[in-house]
Image (cartoon, grey):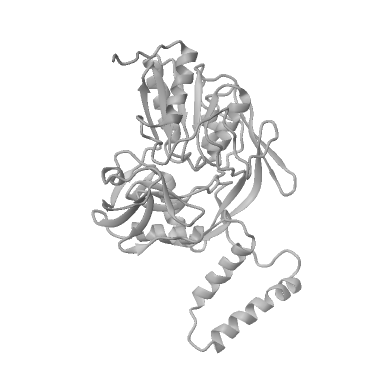
Amino acid sequence: MQSVSHKAAAIIIAAMTAVILILVSVTVTLTLAGGKGYAGLAQNGNGSDDYASRYQRLDEVYNLLMDEYYVEVDSDALIQGAIDGMMASLGDPYTFYFTPDEMSATNSSRSGNYVGIGVQVVRTDDNYIRVTRVFSNSSAKEAGIRIDDIIYSADGVLLRPQSDTELTECVAKIKEGEIGTFVEIEIMRGEEIIPVSVERVAVTQDRVEYEILEGDIGYILLYDFFGNAIEGIESALENFRENDVKGLIFDVRGNPGGSLDLCIQITDYFVDGGVIVYTEDRYGIRMNYEGEDGRVELPLVILVNGDSASASEIFAAAIQEAGTGTVVGETTFGKGIVQTLYQFYQDGAGMQLTTSAYYTQSGKSIHNTGVTPDVIVSNDPGETGDEATDKQLMKALEILWEETGYEKLEDAA
């Protein structure tokens, strides 16, 4: 197979679909349109008079609060509130501001170095924190935490985030503490509340796990499209070549997205060139992201679920439209807009804002609709990741066994 390459512009695009508590470094998963430095503008480009009038009322309100409010006001809190208010006025959960500390934590988490317990989480519609991934060799797995568990409380504090900002704050309650300390968590599993004590640890997290399953079927689990994902995929494929696997399962269930640059490189392994995805901004400017000819010539199944988002959806949709693999599982999250991450030079703070939408090769938008699998299979809560009960994984194996001619030997009665 050819080496990984692509003809896309060198930008990072990320789509936040879940807040990640990966060994408890908190970030939002983006599909990020270019880490850009930003020094600020002296005026808005329409002339200094217009600039002054536009911001005069903001200055007046600020000064009145600072001078006349009945108790002393924190100036920094007012400025932060004004910034947060502008973000909230857009009604876009993917556009927000990072404080310098949050920006630093975001950069650290994407590098693959984390401190925490080792789970990935999302906020549910009824404002609970649900586990979408438990990393292998993590303290969370050792403590018995499972996919679909609800993290109900931490150190006696009930965790019911009403927004993604509050989700970040809840996650912070879990991460606060020195390495080697323990956080006392209550897990809600069905109707049962289970107390668990989980150690905070420092770990370099691999994004990829792989193994060879029955019938010489290679299995790749990709946590997200950040960090050492490419190295992990290349290592897996090399191992599969050496062991002459007959088919391949690629699992992006619970994968919230990541770098579009990495997504294009990984997708390029499994499609025969051409446009993988394209983006359009508010001005109608289109940017194509293309792969090169040649691909892994193996029967392929992609596993997805409702927590597969953004770059995961680009990956699944591209393979589905190219006809080089079968998508199995549940309809994906439906995140079809992309963000640019700006970092401010003055203090290291940052800002993420939605800058364009993305479309599949055929021109389809998956925003708010998701990718519909070729074969729909649903797992009950707690089944995903458990080989004994994982119906989606079993269906993937059955498809590949049939395609490769493998006959499973039934246990004798």
Residue 3 in view: no
- Say left or right for 124 vs 157: right
Q: Is residue 403 above or below residue 312?
A: above
Extreme front residue here? 413
Say whether residue 186 is visible: yes
Name above or below for residue 282 compared with residue 235. Answer: below
Quadrant in which the C terminus is drawn: top left
Q: Residue at x 38, y 16 (%)?
A: 215
Horizontal and vertical percent for residue 301? Answer: 50, 24
| Quarter location, residue 55 | bottom right
- Foreground of the two, 171 or 53: 171
Count of labels in the image: 0
- The image quadrant that residue 133 belongs to is top left
Q: Measured from the top left, where is residue 141 in percent x and y?
A: 30, 43
Q: Nearer the viewer, residue 212 or 33?
A: 212
Q: Residue at x 45, y 22 (%)?
A: 248
Q: Nearer the viewer, residue 53 or 390?
A: 390
Q: Position of residue 125 (x, y in %)?
A: 52, 53
Say which residue appears at 61% left-offset and 56% top-offset: 92
In screen coordinates, is 188 left or right of 50? left
Camera-side residue: 11 or 297?
297
Which residue is at a point 43% across and 60% down the rendered structure image? 160
